[in-house]
Image (spheres, rainbow, N blue to C red):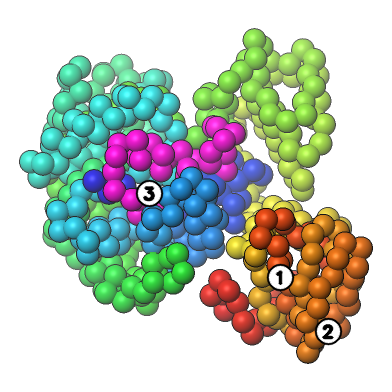
Amino acid sequence: MIPVVLSGGSGTRLWPLSRGMFPKQLLPLCDPRQTMLQQTVARARALSTAPPLVVCNEEHRFMVAEQLQQMGQSDAGIILEPEGRNTAPAIALAAFCALQSDSEAVLLVMPADHLIADQNEFEAAVSQASKAVDDGALVTFGVVPTHAETGYGYIKAQASSSGKPVTVDAFVEKPDAETAQSYIESGDYYWNGGIFMFRADGFLAELEKFQPEVYAAAQNAIKGMQKDLDFLRVDAEEFAKSPSISVDYAVMEKTDKAVMVPLDAGWSDVGSWAALWEVSDKDPQGNAVSGDVIMHDTQNSHIYAETKLVTAVGVQDLVIVETDDAVMVSHRDRAQEVKQVVEQLGTAERSQTKHHRKVYRPWGWYDSIEAGQGFQVKLIQVKPGARLSVQMHHRRAEHWVVVKGVAEVLNGDKTFELQVNQSTYIPIGVTHALRNPSSDEPLEIIEVQSGDYLGEDDIVRFEDDYGRS
């Protein structure tokens, strides 16, 4: 069995913590020791599965690779989606890829950003599903609902208490509150958690039958696949020919091979701050707290402090989130509506929709600690042995001061080392590079940029260790 981990989401309803370039699956939301992606891979690894296939986008690839390496999963295949086309094309890529090494591959498809609290129940459900897969079924896992939820799609099926696979009667769109309540009272409806299990060839046969354009686009994209560092890069032009469609619409709602296995394992999609509050540890007053927080007469709130002291007095049912460049306050019952704020920020082209103040790169990270008219100050950390690209800028000069470690610097036609408190100046148009020669200590520098334009797109790369253009 090959786990297929879908890691293409953006998690806008968990803004300002989750952002386009650092979405919720890459954050340690439910466990301070593991990100959501790492928890998902560990969940599959406990089943003694083959190495996973992770489908992610171009922008997240280095963070995904690093997080997999941190947990000793360097043998994972990382398939890069050239663009987001929804779940059916993503799963098709993984299915074709899996068949290259195993003609009888079974896929366990899981979103990278969901919580499953009870591993034993999850494994029991997978065991039930495997029997149905052996008989040629395409299995979807129906999450046993705990309340009338309007934010999820539903699966109608008359499941028995034994947990065995049953025929799917219908897939149902997200209901209104009254309809959702009737679903719960009937006992015949389950949340659609987006988890599936099937043979790769069986899924592709049904996909070709019902969505031949998706099938052909994925097949041709895989034919043009090339290895690039840790990544599997498919043919972007061919993949772009695929319609954008979910696996439910493309296959599961049409096939006569769909069955459902009930899943009662403490599942949550952690899709909003209210959902995260539900699954978080709370104090006796019902507050979920993270960071430097002091409260008085505060109940049933979720308060997250990243960089500053946050205090709350005489409030209840609030979500308060502080990061280094944004503060979000919402009533807990309306936390889903933060998505509308993110849309406004996107329309205004505010950087806070995509980036945190600290931006991660394959060589390390930088933190934009100050900016003004014609200048910007960054703290840059370079991982041991890593190097920034050989580059130049048309519109800005840079001044580097080493504050930790040793820097190997290329400045024009000279290469030299700088120790702590030493510096160098790089004029506009001069080729330069920065490398950390240490094998175990990070390098940190203060970079002062000056010029009439300081955007990240004013970079001309001549050489790069990470294949960036």
Q: Which mark is residue 5?
A: 3
Which residue, given by chain and number where applicable, does mark 2 sit on? 428
Residue 435, quarter of the rendered image: bottom right
In front of the other: 140 or 31: 31
Q: Nearer the viewer, residue 148 or 456?
A: 456
- Relative height, residue 447 to residue 270 (above, below): below
Secondary structure, mark 2, is loop
Disc 3 from disc 2: Cα separation? 44 Å
164 displayed left or right of 310 = left
CA separation in Å, label 2 and label 1: 20 Å
Read off the magenta span: 27-54
Q: Residue at x 53, y 41 (%)?
A: 35
Please state, as top left, top right, bottom left or bottom right, where the C terminus lies in the image: bottom right
Mark 1 or mark 3: name the one nearer the start of the chain: 3
Q: Position of residue 348 (x, y in %)?
A: 70, 59
Answer above or below: position of 234 versus 94. Answer: below
Can you give x and y, in whole percent of width and height, for residue 55 in the image? Answer: 39, 56
Q: Residue furthest top?
A: 284
Q: Secondary structure at mark 1?
A: strand
**Marks 1,3: beta carbons within 8 A:** no
Disc 1: which residue: 435
**Along the line of sight, the residue nearer the viewer: 373 or 380:** 380
Find residue 134 and report its image quarter. Answer: top left
